[in-house]
Amino acid sequence: MSQIPTIKQVRAYTLKGGGADYHDQADGHWIDDHIATPMAKYPEYRQSRRSFGINVLGTLVVEIEDSAGNVGFAVTTGGEPAAYIVEKHLARFLEGAKVTDIERIWDQMYWSTLYYGRKGIVINTISGVDLALWDLLGKVRGEPVHQLLGGAVRDELQFYATGARPDLAQKMGFIGGKMPLHHGPAEGEEGLRRNLEELATMRERVGPDFWLMLDCWMSLDLNYATRLAQGAQEYGLKWIEEALPPDDYWGYAALKKNVPTGMLVTTGEHEATRWGFRQLLEMGCCDIIQPDVGWCGGITELLKISALADAHHALVIPHGSSVYSYHFVATRHNSPFAEFLMMAPKADEVVPMFHPQLLGEPVPVQGRMRLSALDKPGFGVELNPACELHRPYTH
Ligand SMILES: C[C@H](O)[C@H](O)[C@@H](O)[C@@H](O)C(=O)O
Ligand SMILES: [Mg+2]
């Protein structure tokens, strides 16, 4: 490459209504239908996650423009607070740097925010900037991100589906279906019975071989999770996901010992950085880690997390994250399949995960995606001009 472009400007925008903040859906969507959550102990916040504010943040859009006029971008959750962090704090580490300075920029973003960051929204924000940098580098080089990561190890990705209707996902060609758990410990024995009944009904519909999983979204305690796992064995539950709050590493280590032989424990979608995942892996908390590429530190950090997982014989199956995870999954032997979130309100058809924010967002066909669907420069998607961007801060 002759001259490496430098970064001219970083811009942060916000967007509402689905997309990267995929919990921000209208009434009647399966994703907001009486799902077990840590807030379900309060009856007034039990019926809907939007009632306690799951969708308050909205989407963060990061755009990075270089001296040659190339623009890289990414979307993640974080909304206005994240836009503030990008514009008022992180932009200084990018502007003037070379588009190839990704590792140094990540390091400066992480250590400069340490006193108020480490996890949560700050790492979401850093992830968004990091993904926009990889997108920009791909566009500068005219290569898809998976090629920048060392190249694909498979020609095709296969997917399981997350949604209320694994039976329909089976018909659509997915390799498995993960259902949200509907009742938490506050709904007592009756709730536990109903959880198991729902699983039993689904097992009956999909037959003995289709993977069925339960997503508990941090809502249980160790005792309940153990009883759920034991009761679910009869119905061939493949894995129990995010049963406990993310900080309860000790609980996860105990749960992994308590679940029936063969049942997997998975977690990590709300975990971040190599240090958080090191804790999960070294304490033997789970069989599969599920970093969200837009929340765990971006691709730069995910490569480190993934190497750690490999050394601990754990699979890395990223949570959601659309194209950002597809480009990563294609390059890793320890990521043999991927998640697809069914964003159709009734989970009855395949629609792009980050709809309506991205144009050209590929979707699985018959539960699979050819690598050729990921061959455009960067992450291969564009921002949908029909979505109205708002830039709340400038620097
Ligand atoms: C279905 C779950 O409750 C969440 O909404 C989902 O985002 C998730 O945890 C997942 O693993 O996809
Ligand atoms: Mg989950």
Image (cartoon, rainbow, N blue to C red):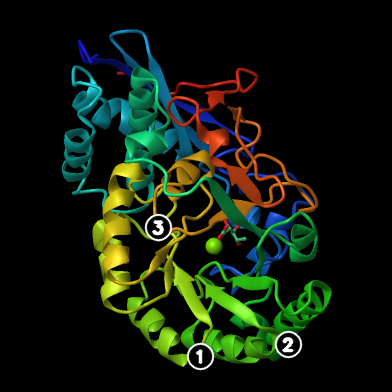
Q: Position of residue 273 (x, y in %)?
A: 29, 55
Q: Provide the residue designation for mark 2.
A: 193
Say if mark 2 contacts mark 3, CB within 8 Å.
no
- Residue under the point 38% across and 44% down: 124
The kind of secondary structure element at disc 1 is loop
Q: Nearer the viewer, residue 291 or 60?
A: 291
Residue behind mark 3 = 333
Assess mark 3: CB under 8 A from ligand 1?
no
Inter-mark Cα distance, 2 to 1: 22 Å
Q: How many marks?
A: 3
Residue 289 position (above or below residue 303): below
Based on the displayed image, in which of its 4 quarters is residue 284 positioned? bottom left
- Image position of 214 (left or right of 200): left
Residue 72 in view, yes or no: yes
Above or below residue 101? Residue 188 is: below
For mark 1, what is the residue?
261
Circles 2, 1 touching at the beta carbon (< 8 Å): no
Choose top left, top right, bottom left or bottom right for residue 314. Answer: bottom left
Q: Secondary structure at mark 3?
A: loop
**Residue 155 located left or right of residue 115:** right
Count neighbours of disc 1 (C-alpha within 10 A) and say few if under 14, some if 14 to 19, many if 20 or more: few
Judge the density around disc 2: few (<14), some (14-19), many (≥20) Cα neighbours within 10 Å: some
- What's the distance in space between the residues labelled 2 and 3, CA to CA? 38 Å
257 relative to 88, above or below: below
Mark 1, mark 3: which one is toward the viewer? 3
The amino acid marked with disc number 3 is His
Callout 1 amino acid: Thr
**In the depicted view, which residue is nearer to us: 142 or 68?**
142
